[in-house]
Image: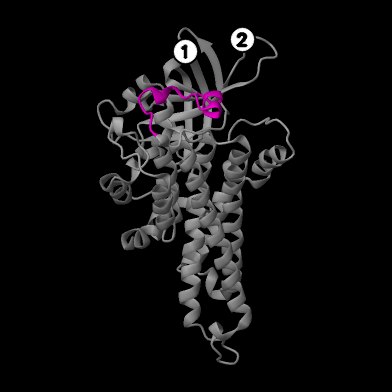
Amino acid sequence: MPALRERAAGAEQLRRLPDETFKDFQDSGAFRCLQPRHHGGYELDPRTFYQAVMDVGTVCGSSAWILGVIGIHNWHLGLFPPEAQEDVWGKDTSTQVSTSLAPTGTVTRGDGGFRLSGRWSFSSGCDFCEWAVLGGQVPTATPGDPPDVRTFLIPRRDYQIDDNWHVVGLCATGSKDIVVDDAFVPEYRTHSYRDAFHLTNPGTVVNDGPLYRLPFGILFPNALAAPAIGVALGALDHFREQTKTRVNPRDKSRVAEDPFTQFHLAEAAADVHAARDRLFANFTAMIELVEAGKPIPLEQRARYRWDAAKATDWSVAVVDRLFLASGGRGIFLGNPIQRAWRDVHAMRAHAGNVPERAAAIFGRSEFGLPPVDIRF
C-alpha cells in the first residue's frame, strides 16, 4: 500500500497506471479474486474482493478503479460461453480484458455472428489488456421484438486505442477510446443482458459455483461503488490526521477543538461507514440465498442496485464535506484530499453510478411495477 501511495501523483502525470502497479496486481493475484477456478482464478467471496478495492482506494482512487473494473471483468468473462473463455485464457490465464459497455457502436448480423464498427469510450486499463468487451444492440429480426442488447468480446488485433484521456479526475486509469473498423465477432463471443437478468448465463456450464449465480447487475455496479467508498475512507483518514495538527492562524486555537469541525468529521464517518456496511450486508444476504439454492427476489435486486448507486452518492458527499472543511490547504496539489475530491467526482460521472437511474429501478419495484430496465 505505501508504494501505491507514493506512485499516485506520478501516475496522474502518466495518465495510466504505472507498469509496476499493474504488475503488483498481477503478481499478487488481485485480479484473480473473482476469476473462475476453471481458468486459474480463486472464486473468492466477493466481499473479500470489494474490501481489497476499498483498501486500495484509500491511497489511490485510480488504482482502486482499475482493480475494481478489471477484476470484475474476470468474473464477467466467466459468464460467457466456455469457448469464449478458452479464447482468452486458454494459453495464459493472466490475460486481462477491458470494457466499454455503452452501446455506442454499430452492430450488424453476419454469417455465424456479428460485425462491429464504431467508437467506444472510457475503456479503463485498456493499455494493459489483450481483449475488449464492447456493448452493442443487435438489430431485431422482427419489428416490435424487445431490444437485444449484448456485450461483444474482441481481440486486440481487431481494434485501435485512441489516446484521448486528458481529464481532471481518475487521471491514471487510462480510460481511452476503443475504435473498431468492421470487426467480425462470432456468436459464441457474445453475452446477452437477457441471460444476465434471467441468470441463464452460458458460462455456468463450466462455472457452476455460487459466485456465478449472483446477478451481473449487482456485481458490476458494486465494483464501481467500492472504489468511491475507498476514496471517501481515505479522505476521512487524511482529514483526521491533518486536522490533529492544524492551528487556527487567527487565534492559535487547535482546529480539532472546533465543534463544527468535529461535526463534519462525525457526519462524514457515519455516511461512508453506512455505505460500506450496506454493501457488505447486501452481499451477505445474497450469498446466503444462492448457497441455499434459492433465487434472489427481484425486489431485493432492485434495492441492491439502488444501494450501489447511493453508496457512490454518499461517498461524493463525504469527500465534498471534508474537502470544504480542510480550508485553504485542501486545494494544494500535494494534499491527497484534493485528488480524492477529483477522483470521486469522476467516479460519480460514470453512467453506472448515476443515482437517478438506479432510483427508477428501485422505485418501480417498490410500486409493484414491472421492470423496464433489465440491467440489475
- Point out residue 334 in the picture as x, y percentages from the top left corner: 45, 68
- Give me the residue at 48% from left, 21% from top: 181
Picture quadrant where residue 364 is located: top right
Q: What type is the residue that disc 1 sits on?
A: Gly
Picture quadrant where residue 272 is located: bottom right
- Point out residue 95 in the picture as x, y percentages from the top left corner: 31, 34
Judged left or right of residue 358, residue 80 is left
Residue segment shown in magenta: 192-209
Looking at the picture, tell me which residue is in the foreground, 248 or 322. 322
- Point out residue 74 in the picture as x, y percentages from the top left corner: 38, 36
For label 2, the crowd category at 10 Å Cα-Cα, with few meaning under 14, some 14 to 19 and many 20 or more, is few
Give the residue at mark 1. Answer: 113
In the picture, the disc for residue 141 is 2
- Give me the residue at 51% from left, 51% from top: 281
Instruction: Tally the marks.
Output: 2
Judged left or right of residue 27, residue 216 is right
Q: Earlier in the sequence, mark 1 or mark 2?
A: 1
* Secondary structure type for disc 2: loop
Q: What type is the residue that disc 2 sits on?
A: Ala
For label 1, the crowd category at 10 Å Cα-Cα, with few meaning under 14, some 14 to 19 and many 20 or more, is some
Q: Looking at the rendering, in which quadrant would you find the C terminus?
A: top right
Q: What is the C-alpha distance between the residues marked 1 and 2?
A: 14 Å
Q: Is residue 164 visible?
A: no
Q: Are marks 1 and 2 in contact (CB under 8 Å)?
A: no
Q: Residue furthest bottom?
A: 251
